[in-house]
Image: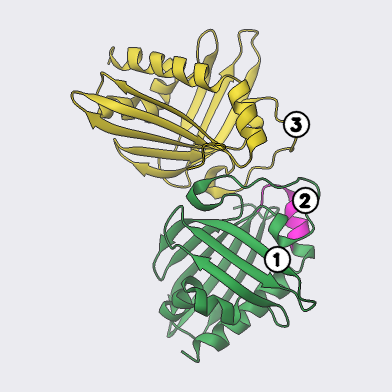
Chain colours: A green, B yellow
Amino acid sequence: MDPKLDLVLERVVDVSKELLWAAWTQPEHIKKWFTPVPWMTVDCEIDLRPGGIFRTVMRSPEGQDFPNEGCYLEVVPNEKLVWTSALGPGYRPIMRASGTTTTCEELYFTAIITLEGHGSGTKYTARVLHGDEASTKKHEEMGFYQGWGTALDQLVAFVKTL
Amino acid sequence: MDPKLDLVLERVVDVSKELLWAAWTQPEHIKKWFTPVPWMTVDCEIDLRPGGIFRTVMRSPEGQDFPNEGCYLEVVPNEKLVWTSALGPGYRPIMRASGTTTTCEELYFTAIITLEGHGSGTKYTARVLHGDEASTKKHEEMGFYQGWGTALDQLVAFVKTL
């Protein structure tokens, strides 16, 4: 882990890791909480195995769609979920223009979600790895902490309705 | 699998898949066969697990060193080995300049080695996935078929000495 290249969101939440896992791994659930309103997640495809696709389509308040395609790397039910935007399904590399990262879909990162039991709740950690400081800074400027934090608020509120 | 984006080397060889696996997964072995002579592999680091490093240093006949760092994605002993140059150890993305791929170290690819029993020998398949046709063409022009084919000749000759 590298403090110059990683962005980390860690929080203890009062819901079980089983419910958090379900919300992270089922397309119909993802659409309910994944994108901070007024953005929406209008499509989601999940093939939950190493090498399988994780694809979402985010819609801006202005109605523009932003597709994001990634690949799962590790799937440990109720404990750990790893995927990357650097690879597509079947581990095929995804090519992006360098030096022009303006949207999330153009940014290379690997996300590691870990869920650990904590009393009756869960210690939730989202760690996002980048390949250089420019990408890290870009992701932070795109609003990583507020965006992923708000998404986590929505995630917790959503699983309480399950 | 995509014929426009994949390069494939497939051959039946008269050595066991267990020996081929050993030669692919031990640094001291890799140095003996990995690079078509007069090139040499002068260093190799292997952490044989998903997320672990696969690093080699190739030395040109002129004495120039070319480091290559990648990350294992799947490790199925004696059957399947998958790694990518798009990620480094711990799945961290590796940043490369785009449009300037001139050496192997600058090329994004994922390699899938599969070993299947075939009589007393092994059906050996090396499939290399790329993200766009330009990368595929570049890899082919760098001598993929001759390079990987010669390396396989050296691999088979080496394991017969074990």
Pointer 1 and pointer 2 on the same chain = yes
Q: Is residue B36 above or below residue B118?
A: above
In this view, the residue farthest toward the front is: B3
Q: Residue at x 67, y 79 (%)?
A: A150
> What residue is disc 1 on?
A66
- Residue A149 coordinates in the image, percent (x, y): 66, 76
Q: Is residue A35 visible?
A: no
Dot 1 amino acid type: Phe
Dot 2 amino acid type: Ala
CA gap, disc 1 to disc 2? 22 Å
CA gap, disc 3 to disc 1? 27 Å
Highlighted magenta segment, given as a residue range:
A130-139
Mark before the other along the chain sequence, 1 or 2: 1
The answer to whether the residue labelled 2 contacts the one labelled 3, judged by CB atoms less than 8 Å apart, is no
Subunit under mark 3: B
Q: Which mark is residue B148?
A: none
Secondary structure character of the magenta stretch overall: helix
> What residue is disc 2 on?
A134
Classed neighbour count for the residue bearing mark 3: other residues with Cα under 10 Å, few (<14), some (14–19), many (≥20): few
> What residue is disc 3 on?
B100
Dot 3 amino acid type: Thr
Q: Is residue B31 above or below residue A121?
A: above
Foreground label between 3 and 1? 1
Classed neighbour count for the residue bearing mark 2: other residues with Cα under 10 Å, few (<14), some (14–19), many (≥20): some
Q: Disc 1 on helix, strand or loop?
A: strand
Pointer 2 and pointer 3 on the same chain = no
Q: Is residue A11 left or right of residue B48?
A: right
